[in-house]
Image (tube, helix red, strand yellow):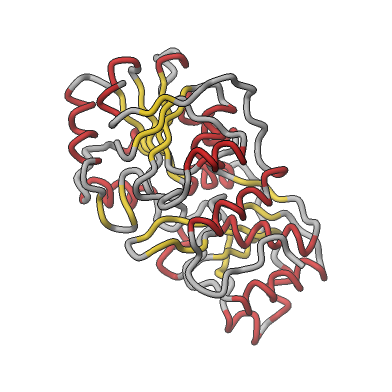
Protein backbone atom coordinates (compact mmCIF):
# COMPACT_ATOMS: atom_id res chain seq x y z
CA UNK A 1 0.00 0.00 0.00
CA UNK A 2 1.29 3.46 -0.88
CA UNK A 3 2.50 5.72 1.90
CA UNK A 4 0.50 8.46 0.19
CA UNK A 5 -3.00 7.03 0.13
CA UNK A 6 -5.13 9.65 -1.63
CA UNK A 7 -7.55 11.57 0.60
CA UNK A 8 -11.24 10.83 0.21
CA UNK A 9 -12.00 14.53 -0.23
CA UNK A 10 -10.12 17.79 -0.80
CA UNK A 11 -6.78 17.40 1.00
CA UNK A 12 -6.37 19.30 4.26
CA UNK A 13 -3.25 21.13 5.39
CA UNK A 14 -2.84 18.51 8.15
CA UNK A 15 -2.98 15.68 5.60
CA UNK A 16 -0.45 17.49 3.39
CA UNK A 17 2.02 18.05 6.25
CA UNK A 18 1.83 14.40 7.29
CA UNK A 19 2.23 13.31 3.65
CA UNK A 20 5.39 15.40 3.31
CA UNK A 21 6.68 13.84 6.52
CA UNK A 22 6.16 10.34 5.07
CA UNK A 23 8.27 11.11 1.98
CA UNK A 24 10.93 13.04 3.91
CA UNK A 25 13.64 10.36 3.33
CA UNK A 26 13.40 11.12 -0.42
CA UNK A 27 13.95 14.86 0.08
CA UNK A 28 17.26 16.71 0.50
CA UNK A 29 18.98 16.75 3.86
CA UNK A 30 18.56 20.00 5.75
CA UNK A 31 21.68 21.83 6.85
CA UNK A 32 22.16 21.44 10.58
CA UNK A 33 21.17 24.54 12.48
CA UNK A 34 20.79 25.98 15.95
CA UNK A 35 18.59 28.77 14.61
CA UNK A 36 15.60 29.93 16.62
CA UNK A 37 13.01 31.39 14.23
CA UNK A 38 12.36 35.10 14.59
CA UNK A 39 8.70 36.08 14.35
CA UNK A 40 8.26 39.29 12.36
CA UNK A 41 5.09 41.15 11.28
CA UNK A 42 6.00 41.06 7.58
CA UNK A 43 8.88 40.99 5.15
CA UNK A 44 9.11 44.77 5.44
CA UNK A 45 10.64 44.41 8.91
CA UNK A 46 13.74 42.61 7.57
CA UNK A 47 13.97 43.86 3.98
CA UNK A 48 17.10 45.88 4.66
CA UNK A 49 19.00 42.72 5.66
CA UNK A 50 18.84 41.27 2.12
CA UNK A 51 19.46 42.33 -1.47
CA UNK A 52 17.89 39.37 -3.30
CA UNK A 53 14.50 37.79 -2.62
CA UNK A 54 13.43 34.43 -4.02
CA UNK A 55 9.67 34.02 -3.75
CA UNK A 56 7.61 30.89 -3.93
CA UNK A 57 4.42 31.63 -5.85
CA UNK A 58 1.39 29.64 -4.64
CA UNK A 59 0.61 30.47 -1.01
CA UNK A 60 2.99 33.46 -0.98
CA UNK A 61 2.12 35.63 -3.98
CA UNK A 62 -1.14 34.02 -5.07
CA UNK A 63 -3.73 31.33 -4.39
CA UNK A 64 -4.73 29.83 -7.72
CA UNK A 65 -5.46 32.74 -10.04
CA UNK A 66 -5.92 35.31 -7.27
CA UNK A 67 -3.12 37.57 -6.02
CA UNK A 68 -2.79 37.64 -2.22
CA UNK A 69 -3.71 40.95 -0.59
CA UNK A 70 -0.36 42.43 0.44
CA UNK A 71 1.91 40.56 -1.96
CA UNK A 72 1.62 42.87 -4.98
CA UNK A 73 2.29 46.01 -2.93
CA UNK A 74 5.30 44.41 -1.23
CA UNK A 75 6.74 43.24 -4.55
CA UNK A 76 6.49 46.77 -5.98
CA UNK A 77 7.98 48.24 -2.81
CA UNK A 78 11.01 45.93 -2.87
CA UNK A 79 11.75 46.66 -6.52
CA UNK A 80 11.41 50.39 -5.88
CA UNK A 81 14.06 49.96 -3.17
CA UNK A 82 16.39 48.47 -5.76
CA UNK A 83 16.03 44.94 -4.41
CA UNK A 84 16.28 41.98 -6.80
CA UNK A 85 13.13 39.85 -6.82
CA UNK A 86 12.83 36.39 -8.36
CA UNK A 87 9.91 33.97 -8.47
CA UNK A 88 10.88 30.31 -8.07
CA UNK A 89 7.79 28.24 -8.81
CA UNK A 90 7.13 24.52 -9.07
CA UNK A 91 4.40 25.30 -11.61
CA UNK A 92 4.72 23.20 -14.74
CA UNK A 93 1.34 23.28 -16.48
CA UNK A 94 1.74 26.60 -18.29
CA UNK A 95 4.58 27.31 -20.74
CA UNK A 96 7.07 29.89 -19.48
CA UNK A 97 5.79 32.88 -21.45
CA UNK A 98 2.20 32.17 -20.39
CA UNK A 99 3.24 31.95 -16.75
CA UNK A 100 5.06 35.30 -16.94
CA UNK A 101 1.94 36.86 -18.45
CA UNK A 102 -0.15 35.40 -15.61
CA UNK A 103 1.95 37.07 -12.92
CA UNK A 104 2.12 40.35 -14.78
CA UNK A 105 -1.69 40.23 -15.09
CA UNK A 106 -1.93 39.61 -11.32
CA UNK A 107 0.08 42.81 -10.77
CA UNK A 108 3.64 41.55 -10.30
CA UNK A 109 5.96 43.57 -12.61
CA UNK A 110 8.30 40.74 -13.64
CA UNK A 111 10.35 40.01 -16.73
CA UNK A 112 11.13 36.60 -18.22
CA UNK A 113 14.41 36.62 -16.29
CA UNK A 114 12.61 37.02 -12.96
CA UNK A 115 10.71 33.75 -13.13
CA UNK A 116 12.16 30.25 -12.86
CA UNK A 117 9.56 27.50 -13.12
CA UNK A 118 9.83 23.74 -12.96
CA UNK A 119 8.48 23.75 -16.53
CA UNK A 120 11.53 25.80 -17.58
CA UNK A 121 13.92 23.50 -15.71
CA UNK A 122 12.52 20.33 -17.25
CA UNK A 123 12.38 21.91 -20.73
CA UNK A 124 16.08 22.80 -20.51
CA UNK A 125 16.87 19.23 -19.45
CA UNK A 126 14.74 17.71 -22.24
CA UNK A 127 16.58 19.80 -24.83
CA UNK A 128 19.82 18.11 -23.74
CA UNK A 129 18.42 14.59 -23.97
CA UNK A 130 18.88 12.21 -26.87
CA UNK A 131 15.88 11.87 -29.14
CA UNK A 132 13.17 9.74 -27.57
CA UNK A 133 9.41 9.67 -27.08
CA UNK A 134 7.94 10.84 -23.78
CA UNK A 135 4.50 9.92 -22.42
CA UNK A 136 3.34 13.04 -20.61
CA UNK A 137 0.99 13.39 -17.65
CA UNK A 138 -0.77 16.64 -18.57
CA UNK A 139 -4.06 18.14 -19.77
CA UNK A 140 -4.42 19.53 -23.29
CA UNK A 141 -4.14 23.04 -21.85
CA UNK A 142 -0.51 22.35 -20.86
CA UNK A 143 0.58 22.45 -24.53
CA UNK A 144 2.91 19.48 -24.12
CA UNK A 145 3.59 19.73 -27.86
CA UNK A 146 5.68 22.83 -27.09
CA UNK A 147 8.18 20.79 -25.06
CA UNK A 148 11.53 20.23 -26.86
CA UNK A 149 10.92 16.50 -27.37
CA UNK A 150 8.69 13.97 -29.12
CA UNK A 151 5.74 13.40 -26.82
CA UNK A 152 2.11 12.41 -26.43
CA UNK A 153 -0.32 13.03 -23.60
CA UNK A 154 -1.46 10.10 -21.47
CA UNK A 155 -5.24 10.07 -21.74
CA UNK A 156 -8.05 7.60 -21.13
CA UNK A 157 -8.57 7.03 -24.83
CA UNK A 158 -4.84 6.31 -25.29
CA UNK A 159 -4.82 3.73 -22.54
CA UNK A 160 -8.06 2.04 -23.51
CA UNK A 161 -7.57 1.97 -27.27
CA UNK A 162 -3.81 1.46 -27.49
CA UNK A 163 -2.12 0.22 -24.35
CA UNK A 164 1.02 -0.56 -26.36
CA UNK A 165 1.53 3.13 -27.15
CA UNK A 166 2.04 3.86 -23.45
CA UNK A 167 4.19 0.77 -23.00
CA UNK A 168 6.37 1.72 -25.97
CA UNK A 169 7.13 5.26 -24.78
CA UNK A 170 10.82 5.64 -23.96
CA UNK A 171 10.23 7.66 -20.78
CA UNK A 172 7.52 9.22 -18.61
CA UNK A 173 7.15 12.92 -17.77
CA UNK A 174 4.80 13.91 -14.93
CA UNK A 175 4.09 17.52 -15.89
CA UNK A 176 0.65 18.44 -14.54
CA UNK A 177 -2.01 16.69 -12.46
CA UNK A 178 -4.95 18.62 -13.90
CA UNK A 179 -7.48 16.07 -15.11
CA UNK A 180 -5.45 13.13 -13.79
CA UNK A 181 -7.54 10.22 -12.47
CA UNK A 182 -7.07 7.13 -10.35
CA UNK A 183 -7.68 5.06 -13.48
CA UNK A 184 -4.82 6.80 -15.29
CA UNK A 185 -2.58 6.40 -12.25
CA UNK A 186 -3.28 2.67 -12.21
CA UNK A 187 -2.65 2.38 -15.96
CA UNK A 188 0.70 4.15 -15.64
CA UNK A 189 1.69 1.97 -12.68
CA UNK A 190 0.83 -1.20 -14.59
CA UNK A 191 2.73 0.02 -17.66
CA UNK A 192 5.87 0.62 -15.60
CA UNK A 193 5.53 -2.85 -14.11
CA UNK A 194 5.45 -4.26 -17.63
CA UNK A 195 8.40 -2.18 -18.77
CA UNK A 196 10.67 -0.09 -16.54
CA UNK A 197 11.63 3.33 -17.93
CA UNK A 198 12.91 6.73 -16.70
CA UNK A 199 10.36 8.89 -14.87
CA UNK A 200 10.83 12.65 -14.61
CA UNK A 201 8.64 14.82 -12.39
CA UNK A 202 8.29 18.48 -13.35
CA UNK A 203 6.44 19.50 -10.19
CA UNK A 204 7.55 17.91 -6.89
CA UNK A 205 4.72 19.52 -4.89
CA UNK A 206 2.27 17.17 -3.19
CA UNK A 207 -0.38 19.91 -3.00
CA UNK A 208 -0.90 23.51 -4.11
CA UNK A 209 -3.05 26.26 -2.52
CA UNK A 210 -6.06 27.22 -4.61
CA UNK A 211 -8.91 29.65 -4.01
CA UNK A 212 -11.03 26.89 -2.43
CA UNK A 213 -8.48 24.65 -0.75
CA UNK A 214 -5.58 22.42 -1.79
CA UNK A 215 -5.19 20.52 -5.05
CA UNK A 216 -3.18 17.30 -5.49
CA UNK A 217 -0.09 17.88 -7.62
CA UNK A 218 2.33 15.66 -9.62
CA UNK A 219 4.61 15.04 -6.63
CA UNK A 220 1.78 13.23 -4.86
CA UNK A 221 1.28 10.85 -7.77
CA UNK A 222 5.02 10.47 -8.32
CA UNK A 223 5.66 9.27 -4.77
CA UNK A 224 2.78 6.82 -5.08
CA UNK A 225 4.41 5.56 -8.27
CA UNK A 226 7.72 5.11 -6.44
CA UNK A 227 5.93 3.20 -3.67
CA UNK A 228 4.20 0.93 -6.18
CA UNK A 229 7.07 0.25 -8.59
CA UNK A 230 10.33 1.00 -6.76
CA UNK A 231 11.14 3.14 -9.77
CA UNK A 232 13.74 5.89 -9.23
CA UNK A 233 12.58 9.31 -10.40
CA UNK A 234 14.19 12.64 -11.25
CA UNK A 235 12.49 15.68 -9.70
CA UNK A 236 12.74 19.21 -11.12
CA UNK A 237 11.90 22.00 -8.68
CA UNK A 238 11.91 22.79 -4.98
CA UNK A 239 13.28 21.44 -2.68
CA UNK A 240 15.76 19.89 -5.09
CA UNK A 241 19.12 21.35 -5.97
CA UNK A 242 18.40 22.03 -9.65
CA UNK A 243 15.83 24.70 -8.70
CA UNK A 244 18.00 26.49 -6.16
CA UNK A 245 21.13 26.30 -8.32
CA UNK A 246 19.16 28.00 -11.10
CA UNK A 247 17.95 30.73 -8.72
CA UNK A 248 21.40 31.35 -7.24
CA UNK A 249 22.93 31.48 -10.73
CA UNK A 250 20.32 34.07 -11.74
CA UNK A 251 21.33 36.14 -8.68
CA UNK A 252 25.04 35.29 -8.77
CA UNK A 253 26.02 38.95 -8.32
CA UNK A 254 24.55 38.84 -4.79
CA UNK A 255 26.37 37.00 -1.95
CA UNK A 256 24.43 34.01 -0.60
CA UNK A 257 24.36 35.72 2.80
CA UNK A 258 22.21 38.49 1.29
CA UNK A 259 19.63 36.17 -0.30
CA UNK A 260 16.31 35.21 1.28
CA UNK A 261 13.98 32.39 0.21
CA UNK A 262 10.34 33.17 1.05
CA UNK A 263 7.85 30.30 1.03
CA UNK A 264 4.82 28.72 2.66
CA UNK A 265 5.95 25.07 2.73
CA UNK A 266 8.52 23.68 5.14
CA UNK A 267 9.35 20.61 3.03
CA UNK A 268 9.90 22.45 -0.28
CA UNK A 269 10.66 26.17 0.12
CA UNK A 270 12.32 26.19 3.54
CA UNK A 271 14.08 22.81 3.26
CA UNK A 272 15.37 23.70 -0.20
CA UNK A 273 16.60 27.09 0.90
CA UNK A 274 18.35 25.71 3.97
CA UNK A 275 19.92 22.91 1.93
CA UNK A 276 21.31 25.45 -0.55
CA UNK A 277 22.80 27.65 2.15
CA UNK A 278 20.52 30.68 2.04
CA UNK A 279 18.29 32.29 4.67
CA UNK A 280 14.60 31.46 4.71
CA UNK A 281 11.30 33.03 5.72
CA UNK A 282 8.13 31.02 6.27
CA UNK A 283 4.74 32.66 5.62
CA UNK A 284 1.76 31.04 7.29
CA UNK A 285 -1.54 32.80 6.56
CA UNK A 286 -2.54 31.39 3.17
CA UNK A 287 -0.58 28.31 2.18
CA UNK A 288 0.48 24.83 3.21
CA UNK A 289 0.42 25.44 6.98
CA UNK A 290 -2.75 27.51 7.20
CA UNK A 291 -4.62 26.64 10.39
CA UNK A 292 -1.85 24.44 11.81
CA UNK A 293 0.36 24.96 14.85
CA UNK A 294 3.45 26.20 13.01
CA UNK A 295 5.80 25.75 15.98
CA UNK A 296 4.72 22.12 16.33
CA UNK A 297 5.22 21.51 12.59
CA UNK A 298 8.74 22.92 12.78
CA UNK A 299 9.58 20.72 15.77
CA UNK A 300 8.16 17.59 14.14
CA UNK A 301 9.90 18.15 10.82
CA UNK A 302 13.17 19.56 12.11
CA UNK A 303 13.03 22.08 9.26
CA UNK A 304 13.70 25.50 10.81
CA UNK A 305 13.21 28.83 9.01
CA UNK A 306 15.13 31.92 10.00
CA UNK A 307 12.00 34.09 10.04
CA UNK A 308 8.25 33.54 10.30
CA UNK A 309 5.53 36.00 9.28
CA UNK A 310 1.82 35.72 8.42
CA UNK A 311 2.43 37.06 4.89
CA UNK A 312 4.90 39.21 3.02
Question: Where does the image place residue 280, in percent across and percent down from the top left?
Answer: 45, 28
Give the side of residue 77 with respect to residue 183, left or right.
left
Could you tell me which quadrant the N terminus lies in?
bottom right
- Residue 7 found in image quarter: bottom right
The correct choice, above or below, for 192 with respect to 16 in the image is below
Percent x, y for residue 151?
58, 63
Of residues 139 and 283, which is closer to you in this image?
A: 283
Q: Position of residue 306 (x, y in %)?
A: 46, 25
* 19 vs 71, nearest the viewer: 19
The quarter of the image holding the C terminus is: top left
Give the answer, above or below, for where 173 lies relative to 75.
below
Question: In the picture, residue 310 is in which quadrant?
Answer: top left
- Given residues 296 and 152, the one toward you in this image is 296
Which residue shows up at 34% across the image and 34% down it? Answer: 114
Work out whether residue 196 or residue 103 is closer to the camera in this orientation and state it.
103
Q: Position of residue 55 (x, y in %)?
A: 38, 36
Count the labels in the image: 0
Residue visible at 69% across and 70% down?
Answer: 188
Against 106, residue 65 (above or below) is below
Q: Residue at x 50, y 31 (%)?
A: 246
Q: Is residue 124 above or below residue 93?
A: above
Amino acid sequence: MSALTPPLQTPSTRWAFEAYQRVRPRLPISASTNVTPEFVPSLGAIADQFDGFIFDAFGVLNAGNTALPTAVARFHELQAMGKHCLILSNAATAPQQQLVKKYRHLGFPITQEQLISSRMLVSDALAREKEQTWAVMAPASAHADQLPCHSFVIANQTVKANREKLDNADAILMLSAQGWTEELQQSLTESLHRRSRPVWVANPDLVAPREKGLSLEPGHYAHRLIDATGRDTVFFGKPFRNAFDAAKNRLSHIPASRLLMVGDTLHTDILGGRSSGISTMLVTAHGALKGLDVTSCIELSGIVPDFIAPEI
